[in-house]
Amino acid sequence: MTIKSFLRNISNLQVRTIGPELIFGTLFDNIGFNAISEELFRHIVIARLTYPTRKLKTVDYLYRYRGIKIEIDKIYRFLDRLNEKHKAKAERIAYKYTQRTLEQISVVFYDMTTLYFESEDEDDLRKIGFSKDGKFQNPQIMLGLWWGKTAIPLAMIYFQVILLKDIH
């Protein structure tokens, strides 16, 4: 009877999943990303590794499995701050970890892709241009990724799409 009465008083919000934190949190620390003192950085990285989907679902994951209630706007503002203040540091940490792991970097791979936005509005980053998905009328960005032999990312870069009509 004691167990039944105990279980009646437990809700899903009181249950925490600790596996991802134990595994990905340890990896996060071993790589050295804990040198970036933004707690939300750790939460977002672990959430995205555990449940790789849209940022809105990251909000759901953090609430459901970590008990962290956060608005999506706070995540977007944080990502802007992360890019402005910590991008270079995160890249240095990843590079140093890769260097320690590989002992030397003898080859770097590079790949590009385009992403389109379901919008007709252009801005400084998004320009209408080539699309591998046939979405030529939508603004595009190009995304580049560098990685070493063991597929550990070294850096990620965003480019504006260069319009063919602008090349002389």
Image (tube, rainbow, N blue to C red):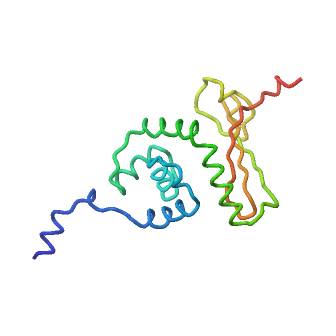
At which x and y percent is residue 9?
16, 63
Question: Which residue corresponds to the image point at 75% horizontal and 49% vertical from the top-left?
Answer: 111
Specify whether 87 is left or right of 61: right
- Point out residue 38 in the picture as x, y percentages from the top left corner: 47, 46
Quadrant for residue 20, please give it.
Answer: bottom left
Q: Which of 70 and 141 is in front in this view?
A: 70
Q: In which quarter of the image is the C terminus?
A: top right
Q: In this view, does 11 lie to the left or right of 89?
A: left
Residue situated furthest left in the rendering: 1
Residue 126 rendering spot, x and y as whole percentages: 65, 29
- Residue 17: image quadrant is bottom left
The residue depicted at 50 percent of the width and 63 percent of the height is: 24
Percent position of residue 98, x then y? 69, 60
Q: Is residue 117 above or below residue 57?
A: above
Instruction: Identify the image quadrant of the N terminus.
Output: bottom left
In the picture, measured across the screen, residue 28 lies left or right of residue 116, that is: left
Instruction: Decide: is 125 above or below 23.
Output: above
Picture mark count = 0
The residue sitting at 59% across, 60% down in the picture is 31
> Residue at (50%, 65%) from the top-left corner?
26
